[in-house]
Image (cartoon, helix red, strand yellow):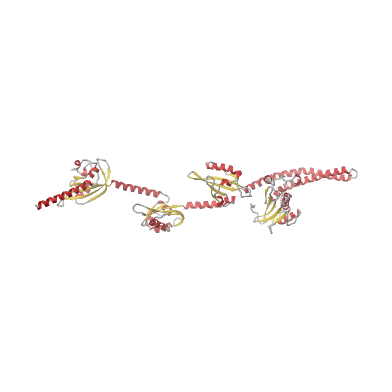
Amino acid sequence: IHDVTSRNGGEESYKEISEFNYNIIYNAPVAIFTLNREGIITSTNPAHLKIAGNPPLEEVLGLDWLHSPMVIAAGLDRYLEKGLAGENFEVSDLPFTTQLTGRRLYMTLRGVPLRNKNLEIEGLLCILEDTTGKNLYLKEMERLQKFNENIIQSITNGIMVVNSDFKICTWNAGMTEIFRISRAHAFSMPLEACLRRMGLSDAVFHIRKGISDGITATLEKVSVETPARGFITLNYKVIPLFTDKAPRPGVVLFFEDVTQKEKTEIRYRTLFKSARDGIVVTDTEGRFLSANPMALGLWNVEWRELKEGRIQDMVHPGDRERFLERLRSIREGREVRSFRAQLCAVEGQDPLPVEMSVSRVLEHEKTVALQFIMRDIRERLRLEAELLQAGKLSGLGELAAGVAHEINNPLATVAGYAEEIMDLLEEWKDRMKADRLLELKSLARTIRDQSYRCKEITRSLLDFARIHPSALVEVDLNEVVRSVLAMAGYPEGGDGDRVFLDLEEPLPPVRADHSHIQQVILNIFKNALDATERGGRITLETGADAHFVWVVIRDTGIGMSEVEVARIFDPFFTTKPPDRGTGLGLSICYRIVERLGGRIDATTREGEGSTFRVFLPRKEKNGGIPG
């Protein structure tokens, strides 16, 4: 009874184990099947049937697995032979194709020999796992890695990746271009040695902080010295890397070589600051963005005073509308030629004439700013006016000489006869009535006086036409000023009431004709006396610099209008009554000073007075005329 009971209990246990194993195999997510020694399928599970396209079980059992339509995979026979010889085997990522579905799959095949109780091999237990998804994922990852590598290598900026072991694991072509270090050489060096060769020993600190603390570092315009390129300028960033597997597996470093850009910026800044023209950059609405020192000097302001304003507000109101029209044109993309405009001046000064050009600053073919270049043309306008004046004087001089010669002889005859009439009247005074005699004598005197006045005018005309420095000698302008005061009946030091002196002592000499210079200063001084008849003061000043000596005659008299001051050096122009001047005095003064290489400047305001400045070259040097 015991034996029977024991045997029955063993059979039940075996049955339970068999059912358990069957359930595991049947429900396994991987294909499990058995082959006998001839390669015939003796058992299989649903996962295997699913891979094959779900054929009926009865059609699968008894098939030769290697040559069945279920599987097309080359080279499987050698693995089966190996298993049937008693060895376990495994082959990964085999390409399989089932004829039933036509699907291409990737499989991992494992084989375990099946033995009987005598340890003889009766067949194979095969496990077939579908690794298609994993294989495709790995291939996609490989493709993405190659794609990313191609992108990294094609970027012109330098990219270097350092892992958490402080090893360089990425070095793109941009790094080689910037530092002249090959990829292989960079990989072969310790990190710190590579950084030293790059001239960036300090970067190891930022790399350590990035890996240990996750801190990003941004450094701009760093100047480093490299063996291959000398000093270069870089912008670079150190950025921590983050992944699911490791919080900070390393850092990536981005390098931008701004050496050429920095050199260009330095050249631009140097040109911008040292340009002899005023340069201003504004936004498209005219708001100031930057201005060079020359531009600030034109307006006589500091940058802090200018930066909140607009350029159109700094243009003289008389020119503002035309300026705004040009501003609209340039914003609309139309070409604007250089033009003249007047800038607002400091209070009490005249508007400043400039020649201005404007151009657009483009980014991606879009206007982002406007650049104005302004040139001070005061000197040019003065030279143009002098050239025009010289032309007028030359032509008028020729005309004056001709007129003077033509009327001199008739005037001499008239004056001579007037003298003769007066002599005859003197002889006849006893034979004629006294009242008739006096009347005739008065008429004759008038004829004589007016004839001499005409002769004086013709003499002035001839002087105007023939002015030339005859005997050039050393002349002390202080002495000339004192002699002029004496000739006009004033003390040599001024009277302290109407006439004042401010003379620089000692004063360098000039080379000039003494009488001509005396004539110039006397003429201007007499004009100042006339201008201050109703009150005012006259100041005579002298001074010198490295090139010129000057006399300034300033009065606080009636002054002149803008129209009058524009013509004061024109021949025959005068602001005096007809019987008090010919209008040739200042014209003659102008020509005398011009012939000596100097100039006369005149500034005046109606009701406030006038200032005349006479500049003459020093004896030692003959430089440019002071502004």
Task: Please state the horizontal and vertical placement of residue 432, each as a whole percent of the image.
Answer: 89, 43
In this rendering, position of residue 75 left or right of residue 396: left
Where does residue 4 sit, x and y in percent of width and height? 10, 51
Residue at 74%, 43% in the rendered image: 402
Q: Residue furthest left?
A: 1
Q: Would you say residue 111 is visible in this rendering?
A: yes
Residue at the outermost right position: 431
The picture places residue 471, in percent across and down from the top left corner, at 72, 53
Exactly how many numbered labels are in the figure?
0
Q: Position of residue 542 (x, y in %)?
A: 69, 55
Q: Is residue 530 left or right of residue 189?
A: right
Residue at x 27%, y 42% (from the top left corner): 103
Left or right side of 445 for 38 = left
Q: For residue 545, which quarter of the picture? A: bottom right
User: Can I make out residue 477 in this image?
Assistant: no
Q: Nearer the viewer, residue 200 or 307?
A: 307
Closer to the camera in the image, 360 or 243: 243
